[in-house]
Image (cartoon, helix red, strand yellow):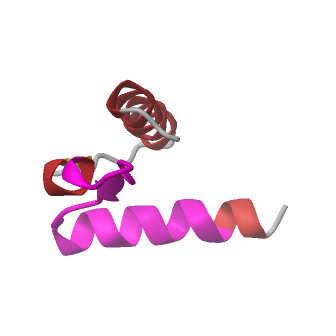
Amino acid sequence: MTTPHEADTQVEQLRAALAANGVTLPSLRVDLPSLTALPARPLVALGNCNLATVQALTAVLRKAAAR
């Protein structure tokens, strides 16, 4: 079972990986209502972002896929 702490850790790792590639998702967070389920099944809300961020994320993913 995933704990809220583990979910927070995973979100921070994703945030760091994105930042290392020049991408920031301002609304990236653990979805709090998903923590209330028994057992907890945390979801990660990637949130809203502007088109420049979408383009940057797309470029990073395409570059990684081409390796």
Q: Is residue 15 left or right of residue 21?
A: left
Q: Quadrant of residue 49?
A: bottom left
**Circle count:** 0
| 50 in the magenta segment | yes
Which segment is the magenta one?
Answer: 36-62
| 42 in the magenta segment | yes
Residue at figure coordinates x 36%, y 25% from the top left: 5
Residue at figure coordinates x 43%, y 63% from the top left: 57
> What percent of the width, then of the height, locates residue 10?
47, 36
> What percent of the width, then of the height, locates residue 41?
39, 54
Q: Is residue 66 left or right of residue 21?
A: right
> What percent of the width, then of the height, locates residue 47?
19, 62
Q: In front: 53, or 31? A: 31
Residue at figure coordinates x 29%, y 46% from the top left: 24
> What percent of the width, then of the height, locates residue 55?
37, 72
Q: Is residue 31 left or right of residue 11?
A: left
Report whether residue 59 is seen.
yes
Q: Quadrant of the C terminus?
A: bottom right
